[in-house]
Image (tube, rainbow, N blue to C red):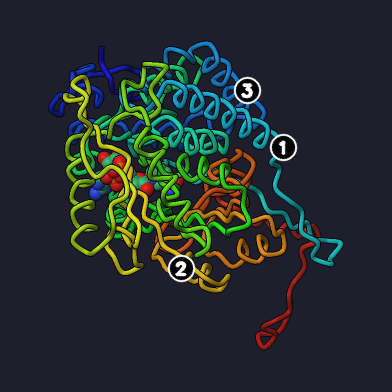
Amino acid sequence: MPSLYIDGTWTSGSGDPAEVINPFDASVIETVEQAGPDDVERAVAAARTAFDDGPWPRTPAAERADLLRRVADLLVRDKEDIARTETLDTGKTLVESRIDVDDVTAVFRYYADLAAHDAGRLVDTGKPSVVSRVVHEPVGVCALITPWNYPLLQLSWKVAPALAAGNTVVIKPSEVTPLTSVMLVRLLEEAGAPPGVVNILLGDGRSVGAPLTEHPGVDMVSFTGGLATGQAIMRAAAGTVKRVAVELGGKNPNIVFADTDFETVVDNALTAVFLHAGQVCSAGARLIVEDSLHDDLVAEIGRRAERIRLGNGLDEATESGPLVSAAHRAKIEDYVASAQAEGARLVAGGRRPEEPDLQKGFFYRPTVFADCRRDMRVVREETFGPILTVERFTTEEEAIALGNDTDYGLSGAVWTNDSGRAERVARALRHGTVWINDFGPYVPGAEWGGFKRSGNGRELGPTGLAEYQEHKHIWHNTEPAPARWFTSGGAR
Ligand code: NAD
């Protein structure tokens, strides 16, 4: 089946086909066609024409919202099928994939509602003869480039607001996990997106992603992925002064004070870091613990980490799946070796699993390191895998300083029963999302994004719609008259 969608037609790509691999057992799920340079040109041209001459940007917002609602209904209809495919492609458990599809559905509904009521605003100029208003217009052709850890979810955070605002899009999913993005485009087609409004190109970053970021026909790039790629994209986009929104990595502190309920914090600290085998941008990979609780907490977390059941994401008994690829596992093994070389104390994991049925897949045991210092590579860099590092603190100021001692600034958490302290720490942390006595939840109505090198711009919430809009000021003087600024020529 053709896997590229350009100008309202499913089409074959002129690039080399690629095998999509199931990380559970390294089997081939499907072979997909990929785009070549001519496909990139065709997709951008289609999106350009649909934007410049097509009906979509001029369609009333309420009708655009109707399309998003139809997509949400179709997602409900196909939930099980999509969730299964996401699990095959990423290795995450089916429970997680189902939650992802529910969240994606909620995002489409949220932006449908928001777009329908987004009428711009009037500005009071103090002059009765002037109408000053700010209108919201789409940016244009948007390239949406997404990662492999939450393929469908990350795409929804971009495509729903981009379409709600009246843009046209060229989607470039990760070459590692393209399958559910193709499914979503099929639903957009079924929901009635006009030709050229939604296009999808499969292929890798070098041959498809990079040309989109340099292309003069593209007005905006919205990217979620790694820091180095984000930096390359910002450089590439400079030539044409594109709007760029980048959601990058994180090294997220999970700060625990000793007055917290022990079982609650053990349980949540494990979920914070080991969900989806740690391949989560907001993973709580840096546990920062008050001295008096430290030893007991480390021991119990280590004991429980050793018991996490690895397996096939499709098996309901599985608690955590594999890493996404052999290359990614090799990266994790390198981080483990560096942590040991730098003096961290291995408390759990640090090895591949022994079970015979897990040998073909890209599995790695949940790993816990104690006695970590902030200058260690494993503490400073995003490992994006099942590695928890533990540091300790004595005072609140120390906890805050440790939590902020990172180049990243995506998310963090503080656990304490003292609400005054919770608020102080939450306000002091330089991260885009801070949870108090929780870790991980988000809602479509609240902004998501990074401080510092975790990115710029915001997804979700009203700001997530504004990312895809130009805010144009229209000044209407209803009683034009000479200004009489330059009078030396003599007024007539
Ligand atoms: P990646 O940067 O390797 O790839 C992301 C996407 O960019 C892929 O589609 C890839 O093909 C494309 N790409 C690669 N090189 C490119 C180039 N030169 N020009 C244009 N496109 C290019 O990231 P990944 O490994 O797929 O994803 C993991 C990263 O994503 C982690 O760092 C993680 O923290 C981050 N992430 C961030 C968030 C967030 O909300 N901030 C969410 C999910 C993932």
Name the amino acid type tagged 3: Asp
- Residue 149: image x %, image y %? 36, 36
User: At 18% across and 23% down in the image, what residue appears?
Assistant: 26
Q: Assign the C terminus to one quadrant of the image.
A: bottom right
Q: Which quarter of the picture shows residue 371?
A: bottom left
Q: How many marks?
A: 3
| Mark number, residue 66 | 3
Disc 1 is placed on an element classified as loop
**Earlier sequence position, callout 2 versus callout 3:** 3
- Report which residue position mark 2 lands on: 402
Name the amino acid type tagged 1: His
Q: Which quarter of the picture shows residue 251?
A: bottom left
User: At 49% across and 71% down in the image, what residue appears?
Assistant: 401
Q: Which of 190 and 485 is in front in this view?
A: 190
Estimate the spatial distance between the alpha carbons at disc 2 and disc 3, rounded to whole Å.
47 Å
Q: Assign the N terminus to one quadrant of the image.
A: top left
**Earlier sequence position, callout 3 versus callout 1:** 3
- Residue 408: image x %, image y %? 41, 61
Image-quarter location of ligand 1: top left
Q: Kindly tell me whether residue 215 is visible in this rendering.
A: no
- Report which residue position mark 1 lands on: 117
- Residue 476: image x %, image y %? 73, 57
Q: Is residue 334 above or below residue 373?
A: above
Ligand 1 is within 8 Å of the C-beta of the residue at disc 3: no
Mark 1 is surrounded, within 10 Å at the Cα level, by few (under 14), some (14 to 19) or many (20 or more) other residues, namely: few
Estimate the spatial distance between the alpha carbons at disc 3 and disc 1, rounded to whole Å.
13 Å
**Earlier sequence position, callout 1 versus callout 2:** 1
- Residue 475: image x %, image y %? 70, 59
Disc 3 is placed on an element classified as helix
Mark 2 is surrounded, within 10 Å at the Cα level, by few (under 14), some (14 to 19) or many (20 or more) other residues, namely: many
